[in-house]
Image (cartoon, rainbow, N blue to C red):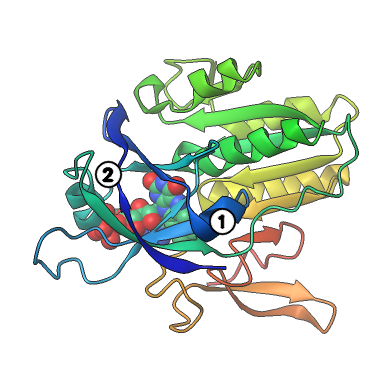
Amino acid sequence: MAERYRLEILDHREVAPGHWEMLLPRVGGLRDAEPGQFVSVLCRTGESWDPLLRRPFSIYRAEEDAFSFLYRVAGRGTRQLSRARAGETLDLVGPLGRGFWYRDLVPGSRVALVGGGVGVPPLFFLSQRLLEAGAVPEIYAGFASARQAVALDRWQRLGLAPQVATDDGTLGYRGVVTELLERRLAGEGLQRIYACGPRPMLREVARLAGAWGIPCQVAMEEWMACGAGVCLSCVIKVEDDASPGGRWMRVCREGPVFDGAKVVWNRA
Ligand SMILES: Cc1cc2nc3c(=O)[nH]c(=O)nc-3n(C[C@H](O)[C@H](O)[C@H](O)COP(=O)(O)OP(=O)(O)OC[C@H]3O[C@@H](n4cnc5c(N)ncnc54)[C@H](O)[C@@H]3O)c2cc1C
């Protein structure tokens, strides 16, 4: 269950230019967090009220007594957050949302994890859980350039060999990560695809998965103000049996993970 915590920052370091990982104690309900769930963080410091709203970040790593999130400095909130130091206190609410579903996979199931940019962090947590469940994750990670590449060393320590694409060709394949996925789909044995990243990437992953008849789960990122299902700022249209044309669902509550085949991608 989601609760508010004030936690001592155990570690906070820049893992790539403009990308920070913050390590926090894994206490209370945070122990039950599932991959794809997120925490909602107060990014202001001291007496300041700015920024007023919390910012959402996916859980990146889950260790025995600690967990982390990994973020890119995007604007005011994350810039302030990057100034926090180990030993200071962080105010967060979590775990929030509905994560990836994977417990139905039988040992030996081969699955693809497709991440773009800071969509990669929740897939690392997912890969930890998939390995525990005996599944075989294949990692496909896309970044703008080698300087923005994150999590690759962590995956290698788990014994996984991520396939990497960069827009500028400075690391791995030159091009977009969905091209790597498309090549893989020509092979056999993939039972499921999990994806997180920019909306155009998710849309293409869902299209490819549909074309090859492979179930696909996507973790959506939308602007959200409350993160608690109240403000309705993060709604997207998703089909269900009762509403074939789609109905509005809250990314923070019913998501952020949805069946990629059900998301209405072409909404305004
Ligand atoms: C469920 C969820 C999980 C997320 N997990 C991560 C994560 O693990 N790591 C990470 O780096 N980021 C993650 N994000 C995005 C992160 O929340 C935003 O980058 C952050 O809120 C920006 O705050 P800011 O005050 O620094 O930027 P602002 O000043 O508020 O905005 C700066 C720029 O960032 C972009 N932006 C802000 N919020 C979002 C958003 N929700 N989606 C897309 N673009 C946005 C806007 O284009 C804007 O121009 C996640 C978002 C969601 C909804």
The quarter of the rendered structure image containing the N terminus is bottom right
Q: In this view, does 183 lie above or below 171?
A: below
Alpha carbon separation for disc pair 1 and 2 = 20 Å
| In front of the other: 16 or 61 | 61
Q: Which residue is drawn at 22% across and 42% down?
A: 87
Q: Which of 41 and 240 is in front in this view?
A: 41
Q: Left or right: 226 with respect to 166?
A: left
Residue type at numbered disc 2: Val
The residue under the point 66% across, 19% down is 160
Q: Quadrant of residue 98?
A: bottom right
95 up-or-down from 170: above or below: below
Check disc 2 and report the residue beneath it. Answer: 73
Which is more foreground, mark 1 or mark 2?
A: 1
Classify 10 Å Cα crowding around label 2: few (below 14), some (14-19), many (20 and above). some
Q: Residue 209 carries which label?
A: none
x and y percentages locating residue 194 in the rendered image: 69, 44
Q: Earlier in the sequence, mark 1 or mark 2?
A: 1
Q: Identify the residue position indicated by label 1 in the image.
A: 37
The image quadrant where one finds ligand 1 is: bottom left
| Tag 1: amino acid | Gln
For image coordinates 63% across by 37% down, the residue present is: 114
Q: Nearer the viewer, residue 149 or 80?
A: 80
- Decide: few, some or many residues near mark 1? Use Cα within 10 Å; few <14, some 14-19, many ≥20: many
Residues at discs 1 and 2 in contact (Cβ within 8 Å): no
